[in-house]
Image (tube, rainbow, N blue to C red):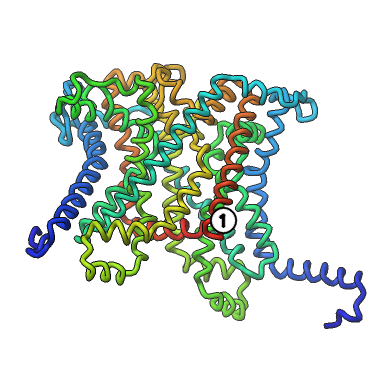
């Protein structure tokens, strides 16, 4: 390796530069990874042993007990179910809405194009804000429902524009020839455009899914008192908040019992891992897609 | 072509019928867009109507017509509230710190990463560095709190181990450190992700420039300074201007999750202030006034930033 990096003729300034480069990227890698590995190690370590401290990236007294204990807690199972459900439903609905709108906006002949496009674009710059939105959700009787997770954010202008700029790159001749074959606009969308838009759809699906999986504030705001609509992120948030501040007001008795069995620290670490693992599993596969999508979106917007 | 002989009403009628003709032809396009337009109207535009609340003594139970109008009362209250100025200060402080660090560090990292010649190593580091972007702020806040904790937190362990400090610092209780903690957490989470756009820009720089520089005897660091950095200048300018437009809308998520009652004087941003005073205390009108202030300033900043951008590049980003 060294021979490849430094051939004998390499000037000193370049060697120093190379050293800086590899030093910095090593440092960044460690700073990024260490916290995750540390959390993982503690979550797999016996909770009474963890209190002694000194655990770095390997568990000292290996055990699955922390996980067993928290999975016995019903709130976590509900949270897991709801989190998965909202991710699946939210992603599918978001993909349908964004791709349909993107398709109509990519059609130069569409009469409503300019209006719809402006109408959407404005939402990226002006928003009513937290409280008017809260009142609206309340007036629509969506408080304490599952719908509040997927409906208000169904249409995202950003996603529409990313997909549209992708569709713009598909030759219009394809649509015309489909039309000659007697296809209507919906068939063109479904049979011609959607299959060709897969890379952009994959990117947007990733963004939507991660967004859904990671959100906690809507649960806090609208469904905080509904045990059956709780999400994993919200449960984790409650545990973290209860240990950093002394806010015991919105804390269920159920979880306190769990924390009494094993230390709050271990509960926190184990839930953190449970919440993070799905993301770790999906994202390396989609990395190529999202890098492309990200650059595309950034260039256009 | 027949326009010479056609009189106006006929033309209008034909235009109308042409509109409806195309409308029916494009019925599927309308069916695929109008329902979502309606959707956007309800969830994105109706809340703007809710701004009227700020000018009323809003009672949730009464209908719109029964509300009592109070003019600018809540805005006056707002501008006489010390907490408001504190929230404004916190918002601007964290936003400017985030802006400066959030630009310099990813640019430097992107340039260095670009110099990694071993392909798989470069991809590996990229994959790792994007990772924190995908975890939620809840997870990030939990991890940061753990790393900074006084009992066995990695940061305190390291600092004590290196004899930089004698006893662990109580990071969570130090108000004056809160802004730095938020900024540092942001850097930890987003640096890798923010390099994507710079790496794409760097990839667009012509290799002949580097070759010419090599012929002239430029070292690698000189190439990075004189070719790579100027090569991504326009990308940097665009991104800085977009960020200036978002200067005041930094939200509340990080501050909500990382903060606690001990550091409230430093953690309360405008949005958090609206959340605590507006929803927490049920003062909807007052909270809406904060939201309006926030939105109006945002739009002004956005147009100012866009104006500057137009002057520099003759293009608009809006």
Disc 1 residue crowd, few under 14, some 14–19, many 20+, Cα 10 Å: few
Nearer-the-camera pick, A123 or B316: B316
In the rendered view of the protein, which quadrant contains the N terminus of chain A?
A: bottom left
Residue A190: which quarter of the image? bottom right
Which quadrant of the view contains residue A45? top left
Q: Is residue B8 left or right of residue A254?
A: right
Q: Which residue is found at the position 61% from the left and 74% from the top?
A: A183
Horizontal arrangement in the rendering, residue B242 relative to residue B179 (left or right): right
Label 1 secondary element? helix
**Residue A200 placement (x, y as % from top left):** 45, 61
Determine the residue located farthest toward the bottom in the rendered image. Answer: B1
Can you see residue B279? Answer: yes
Residue A286 in the image: x percent, y percent?
A: 35, 56
| Left/right of residue B88 with respect to residue A53 in the rendered view | right
Tell me the residue at 65%/55% (across/down): A118
Q: Height in image: B217 above or below B172?
A: below
Determine which residue is flagged by label 1.
B310
Instruction: Report the chain holding disc 1.
Output: B
Count of numbered circles in the view = 1
Observer able to see residue A262: no
Q: Residue at x 38, y 57 (%)?
A: A291
B294 in relation to A281, above or below? above
Q: Position of residue B67 (x, y in %)?
A: 76, 25
Is A205 or A156 nearer to us in this picture?
A: A156
Q: As drawn, which residue projects farthest toward the front?
A: B216
Residue A102 picture quarter: bottom right
Report x, y in % for residue A248.
Answer: 42, 17
Task: Left or right? Give the position of B126 relative to A170.
Answer: left
């Amino acid at each position: 390796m060294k021979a490849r990096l430094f051939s004998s003729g390499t000037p000193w300034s370049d060697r120093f530069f190379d050293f800086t480069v590899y030093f910095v990227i090593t440092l960044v890698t460690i700073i990024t990874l260490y916290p995750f590995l540390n959390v993982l190690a503690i979550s797999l370590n016996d909770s009474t042993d963890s209190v002694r401290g000194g655990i770095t990236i390997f568990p000292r007294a290996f055990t699955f007990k922390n996980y067993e204990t928290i999975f016995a807690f019903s709130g976590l199972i509900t949270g897991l179910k709801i989190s998965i459900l909202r991710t699946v439903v939210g992603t599918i609905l978001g993909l349908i809405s964004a791709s349909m709108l993107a398709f109509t906006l990519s059609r130069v002949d569409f009469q409503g194009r300019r209006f719809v496009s402006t109408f959407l674009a404005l939402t990226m710059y002006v928003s009513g804000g937290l409280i008017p939105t809260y009142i609206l959700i309340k007036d629509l009787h969506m408080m304490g429902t599952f719908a509040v997770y997927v409906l208000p954010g169904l249409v995202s202008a950003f996603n529409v524009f990313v997909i549209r700029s992708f569709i713009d790159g598909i030759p219009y001749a394809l649509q015309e020839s489909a039309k000659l074959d007697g296809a209507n606009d919906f068939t063109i969308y479904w049979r011609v455009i959607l299959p060709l838009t897969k890379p952009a759809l994959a990117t947007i699906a990733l963004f939507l899914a991660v967004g859904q999986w990671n959100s906690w504030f809507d649960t806090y705001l609208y469904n905080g008192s509904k045990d059956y609509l709780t999400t994993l992120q919200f449960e984790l948030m409650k545990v973290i908040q209860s240990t950093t501040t002394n806010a015991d007001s919105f804390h269920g008795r159920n979880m306190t019992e769990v924390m009494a069995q094993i230390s709050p620290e271990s509960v926190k670490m184990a839930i953190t891992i449970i919440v993070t693992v799905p993301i770790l599993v999906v994202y390396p596969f989609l990395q190529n897609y999202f890098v492309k999508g990200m650059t595309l979106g950034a260039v256009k917007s | 072509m027949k326009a010479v002989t056609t009189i106006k009403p006929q033309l209008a009628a034909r235009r109308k019928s042409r509109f409806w003709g195309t409308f029916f032809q494009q019925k599927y396009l309308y069916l695929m867009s109008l329902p979502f337009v309606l959707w956007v109207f309800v969830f994105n535009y109706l809340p703007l109507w809710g701004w009227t609340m700020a000018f009323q003594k809003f009672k949730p139970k009464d209908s719109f017509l029964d509300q009592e109008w109070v003019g600018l009362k809540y805005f006056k209250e707002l501008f006489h509230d010390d907490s408001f100025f504190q929230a404004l200060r916190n918002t601007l402080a964290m936003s400017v710190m985030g802006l400066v660090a959030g630009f310099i560090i990813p640019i430097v990292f992107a340039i260095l990463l670009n110099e990694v010649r071993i392909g798989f190593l470069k991809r590996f580091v990229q994959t790792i560095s994007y990772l924190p972007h995908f975890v939620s702020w809840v997870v990030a806040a939990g991890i940061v709190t753990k790393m900074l904790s006084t009992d066995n937190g990695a940061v305190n362990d390291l600092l004590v181990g290196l004899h930089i400090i004698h006893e662990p610092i109580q990071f969570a209780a130090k108000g004056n450190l809160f802004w730095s903690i938020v900024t540092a957490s942001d850097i930890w989470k987003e640096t890798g992700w923010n390099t994507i756009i710079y790496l794409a820009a760097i990839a667009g720089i012509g290799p002949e420039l580097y070759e010419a520089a090599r012929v002239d005897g430029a070292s690698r660091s000189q190439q990075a300074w004189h070719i790579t950095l100027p090569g991504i200048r326009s990308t940097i300018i665009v991104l800085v201007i977009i960020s200036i437009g978002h200067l005041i809308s930094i939200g509340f998520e990080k501050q909500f999750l990382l903060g606690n009652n001990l550091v409230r004087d430093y953690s309360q941003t405008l949005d958090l202030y609206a959340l605590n005073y507006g929803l927490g205390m049920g003062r909807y009108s007052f909270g809406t006034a904060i939201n309006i202030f926030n939105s109006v300033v945002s739009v002004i900043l956005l147009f100012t930033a866009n104006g500057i951008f137009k002057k520099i590049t003759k293009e608009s980003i809006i």
